[in-house]
Image (tube, rainbow, N blue to C red):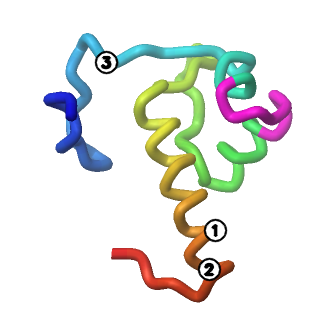
Amino acid sequence: MTKYNHLLPGDPIPPELDKQVGVQQVAEMFGVTTRRVQQFAKDGIIPPPTQHGKYHLLRTVHAYLDHLRGEVARKHGLELR
């Protein structure tokens, strides 16, 4: 485990992990279109881009993973902790 496994939503991100990426990079990581990434942000699934149109990488990935966990839990009738 890394020393960052304790980061929670809202925690400050260490500078070395505070990377910002464009919508194309997020789309490629998630395997979706850029339009879908924009829709995720509009729907509140991931944080919106900064005023410069970039996404905070770590927060975006965490939010998307939380969303996927929730989808799996709902599909299988599970309760998330």
**Splitting the image into 4 quarters, where does residue 32 fall?**
top right
Residue 17 — which label?
Answer: 3
20 magenta-colored: no
Query: Residue at position x 22%, y 39% from top?
Result: 5
State the residue at coordinates (41%, 76%).
80
Which residue sits at x=66%, y=26%? 29
Q: Secondary structure at mark 1?
A: helix
Q: Residues within 10 Å of mark 2 (few under 14, many from 20)?
A: few
Q: Which residue is mark 1?
A: 71
Report the Cα–Cα distance between label 2 and label 1.
5 Å
| Span colored in magenta | 29-36
Classify 10 Å Cα crowding around label 1: few (below 14), some (14-19), many (20 and above). few
Give how far across and how far down residue 66 sits, in percent. Answer: 49, 56
Depth check: give the residue in front, 20 or 7.
7
Q: Nearer the viewer, mark 2 or mark 3?
A: 2
Question: Percent x, y for residue 59?
Answer: 43, 36
Q: Which residue is at the front of the view, 66 or 52?
A: 66
In the displayed structure, would residue 16 be above or below residue 57? above
Q: Amino acid at mark 2?
A: Arg
Evaluate if marks 2 and 1 touch, with contact meaning CB atoms under 8 Å apart.
Answer: yes
Labels 3 and 1: the sequence-earlier one: 3
Return the residue at label 2: 74
Tell me what residue is drawn at x 85 percent, y 31 percent: 33
Residue 71 relative to residue 47: left or right: right
- Type of amino acid under label 3: Leu
Left or right of 39? Residue 81 is left
Residue 68 higher or lower than 71, as above or below:
above
- Quick one: label 2 or label 3, which is nearer the N terminus? 3
Quadrant in the rendering for residue 73: bottom right
Which residue reaches farthest left? 3
